Image (spheres, rainbow, N blue to C red):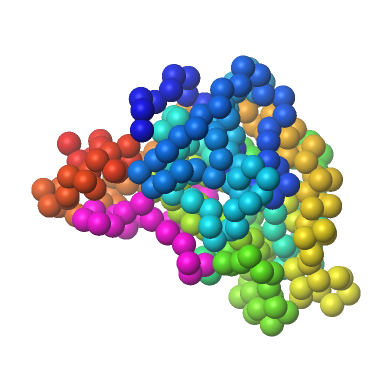
Amino acid sequence: MDANPTGKPILGIIGGSGLYEMPGLQNVVEHELSTPFGKPSAPLIVGDLEGRKVAFLARHGIGHHISPTEVNYRANIYALKFLGVEQIISISACGSLREDFAPGEIIVPDQLFDLTRDRQRSFFGEGLIAHISVAEPFCIRLSQRLYEAVKSTNASIHAGGAMITIEGPRFSTRAESNIFRSWGLSVIGMTTSPEAFLAREAEMCYAVMAHVTDYDVWHISEKPVTVEMVVEILHQNTQIAQSAVRNLAKFLDPERNCPCPSALSNALITNPTVVPQKTRRRLDLLVGKYLK
């Protein structure tokens, strides 16, 4: 990759289903990047929002042509890191596994259960091993700031809840949905894993604005989830998401008094003298400061 473009964004926004652009950006610059892990889902858009520089990435590509399994999560996170992004907000659709989390409401989850199986989950391997701590998979500080930003829009929002990521692209069977409920999980989606874990490996803060679009398929008095149902709710919530991002960008503190900036400090287990040069070069953006 070329030298890092000037002007570090205060915030990175990963838009999921229903949010493919960020209206209101000024002084927009489009970055067509390639990373050691391949190309991101789409060009990264950097511009000014509320007087602060932000970066936007469409997770599923322009026109939503990339399935949850096919998203190049490593390239997306690496590209945002390359642009200087340190704090990421993911905007995602989700199904509710709880009666009290109703369609149209927003959840800022605090826990994550990964049930995916066909994705690259880590930047590490090939001669350099890291065991990252993810007991708290989302940045607690950024999640609180996100909750406050959404709350200021007068939207109905819940703080906390465990999200499960399934492989997709299909929706759940009723048996699966009821099993997830019996496990005590709150919402279900298809993209937060491994995105959250990769952000932690990159020492970036990460939080999710999860828009409840349906009751999955467990709720016998409601219709099973459909794409039409998901899109309808997301269209209704687009203004909320955009207003919340504006509020967050305007007041977000660039100083990160949380564990995220040093997540790798006690995670690297490989003796630096045996790390292959090829691996060192590929991961220099992430671990260069630790392998000197």
Front residue of this view, candidates 27 and 84: 27
Asked if residue 274 is positioned above or below residue 95 in the image, the reply reads: above
Q: Quadrant of the N terminus?
A: top left
User: Which residue sits at x=21%, y=56%?
Assistant: 127
- Outermost left residue: 273
Image check: 195 left or right of 176?
Answer: left
In screen coordinates, is 130 left or right of 215? left
- Residue 158 in percent (x, y) is at 72, 52
Q: Main secondary structure of the magenta part?
A: loop
Q: Quadrant of the C terminus?
A: top left
**Does residue 282 appear to the left or right of 106 in the view shown?**
left
In which image quadrant can residue 111 be found?
Answer: bottom right
> Which of 244/242 is in front?
242
> How far from the left and from the top, in percent, is residue 251?
62, 26
Q: Is residue 143 magenta?
A: yes
Q: Quadrant of residue 238?
A: top right
Going 75% across and 68% down the picture, which residue do you hit? 216
- What are the residue bounds of the magenta stretch? 116-144
Residue 95 x, y percent position in the rendering: 72, 62
Q: Horizontal placement of 222 versus 135: left or right?
A: right
How many circles with numbers are drawn on the protein? 0
Measuring from the top left, give residue 145's x and y in whole percent. Answer: 61, 37
> Relative to residue 280, is residue 11 depicted above or below?
above
**Whether residue 245 is visible:** yes
Identify the residue shown where x is 42% and y is 46%: 38
Which residue is more in the foreground, 165 or 42?
A: 42
Is residue 128 rendered magenta in the image? yes
